Amino acid sequence: MALFQTLKTAAGVWNPLLWLIALAVAIGIGLYIRSRGRADSRQGPAREPFISGNPEPENAGAHIPATNLYWGFTEALKGWYQKLLPIHTGVLTDYVAWFLGVMALTFIIALAG
Amino acid sequence: MQTFLISHLPALLVALPLLCGFLMPVIGRAGPRVRNGWVLLGGALTAITGLLLAIQVLRFGPVTYVFGAAHTTQTLAENPAAAFPIRIMFEIDALGALMIINTTLATLAVIIYSVAAEAKQSGLDMFYALFYLLIAGVYGMVATGDLFNFFVFLEITSLAGAALVAYRIDRGVAVEAGLKYALLSTLAALAVLTAIGILFGQYNALNIAALASRLQFTPLDKVALCLLIVPLAMKCGAVPMHFWTPDVYTTAPSSVTAFLVISSQASLYGLFRVLFSLYGAMLSWATFGWFLIILGVLSAFIGVTMAIPQKDVKRLMAYHAVSQTGYMLLAVGVGLAVLGNASALAKFGRAAIAGGLFHIINYASCKGLLFLTAGAIFLRTGTRNLNRLGALGHAMPVTMVLFMIAALAIAGIPPFNGFASKLMIYQSVFHFSPLLAIVAMIVSILTLASFVKVFQALFMGPRRPEFANVREVPRPMLIGMSVLAAYIVIAGIFPQFFVTRMIAPAVNALLDRAGYIATILGGI
């Protein structure tokens, strides 16, 4: 049937239905392994979260704000961001300048080519 | 009657939303229920018209429509006496049909959503009048076969878009964003109009097919080319002319933002149409292919890296919009770059263009859904600040699932539609340049990384007292969002069905410049 055809890409194929079947099998295996586990594993002290020996914070303090989540990423790429962020001035005349600059460059490319 | 309606579908495609918009202030006087009914009826009729027309084109070939002619299908070829240059003529081929389907899907989802999302706002009569003007403008841009009409519809979308962005004047930033959008759009439109003037002055024609058949590629034509492609690249948000996108997408109401994405894609369509159908064989393919590729890579990488540090959820999504536009420019640029090499075109060029065009509709659905979910969250919490939001998964589980579908799809995770189009882009671009394919994959990884952050910031964590009264958004909003989610899942599970029926004909239409000209001029 046309609906279930395999997608042909430039160098391979992709069939989401086969992928979904494989995923379902993997989930099934996972659930089977889980069902073989000890029923009493969720009782007692093992149930408490272990945060390197620190006490569990209150709900309000347990949420990690978005800024903290990728602090390491932005810190590692500080050099890139130091160049990139100042370009985004929010000033309309700068936007026009970029537009005119690209236009001028394209003129040169088109007329020279 | 049925035949009459079908024969006039191209006219109805623009006339219906215009009628719906212009009658809105009158019908709105009858009360909000009647107005909402009119909004939904207009949306449904417009969507049905769009779908019927697209199906007609995909099944039976290009459709032409001449406004004001005794016989609306009478093209320049059939009546040489009528071959005067100024004539409103629509030419809808498979590429146009793809864009119409894209617009229709968004129209349907956004209209259903906005009826509930905007219910408590004032000034809705004019809001919807402008909204339908925007819809008519986008349909016109992707349906017209005339360059001056294209300019007119571009202006309609720009003015309606700017007015909608600035519509909530109680927010100063909205007015500022609207002003920026209006000024840059005017600048772009002026450049396009100048290009049209240059071409008309030389060839006494405004019809794209007629112009394409007469083009000599003089230095003036090259100037006109620049005046066409640079503004259109800016309107679709390509780096380094993307600065307006975060400002505008962030402050506009979310239903407007979701449709502004479609408006930007109509400019992308215009860019491809100019490069392939209008100039086509005249161009230095490698030069302009690389022009698109460089814009694409810059947009993809700078867009995604700018998204990561954002704290405003819609601003983050706006930078992602820039990034995803980069994929389309990159893929179609690769196809353009190898246009003169038959074996490369057959081996990977067509697949690259197919991936790029498939990503247009996939991206529109994912990004549209993401903006709508952001609007749902803003409606309930009153903030877009990711640092202040959290734990909404408890109160808004359906919105959370819809967000997950869109985020996974746009990050290229199987089995959603974004994976299928991105896979086509990776593999075809890899044949052209492995380095470009690697950059594209890194961008996808970063996209996933930033959406993990957004998901965690919005939905995860224990319940928070400040959001104790938050509840799920009204059902019409969920239905509107579900329309897009349904497409994301269906196109993800059955990608080849969509590629065979919609994308491959669109690729053929884009590459077949002679066919585009012959549809109007009959083999002249």
Image: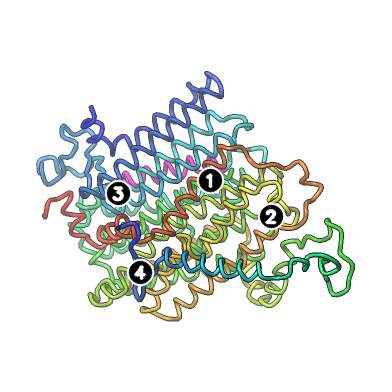
- Nearer the camera: disc 1 or disc 3: 1
Quarter of the picture holding the C terminus of chain B: bottom left
Q: Which element type, helix, strand or loop, lies under badge 1? A: helix
Residue under label 4, please give it. B352
The first of marks 2 and 4 along the sequence is: 4
Q: Earlier in the sequence, mark 3 or mark 2?
A: 3
Q: Secondary structure at mark 2?
A: helix
Q: Residues within 10 Å of mark 2 (few under 14, many from 20)?
A: many
Q: Which residue is mark 2?
A: B459
Query: Which amino acid, by three-letter code, is at mark 4?
Result: Ala
| Viewer-nearest of discs 4 and 3 | 4
SS at circle 3? helix
Q: Which quadrant of the view contains residue B327?
A: bottom left
Q: Nearer the viewer, residue B319 or A42?
A: A42
Q: Quadrant of residue B18?
A: top left
Chain part drawn in magenta: B143-165
Q: Chain of mark 4?
A: B
- The percent coordinates of residue A56 (x first, y second) are 86, 64
Residue mark closest to the camera, 3 vs 2 = 2
| Quadrant the N terminus of chain B occupies | top left
**Three-letter amino acid code of the residue under disc 2:** Phe
Is residue B162 within the magenta segment? yes
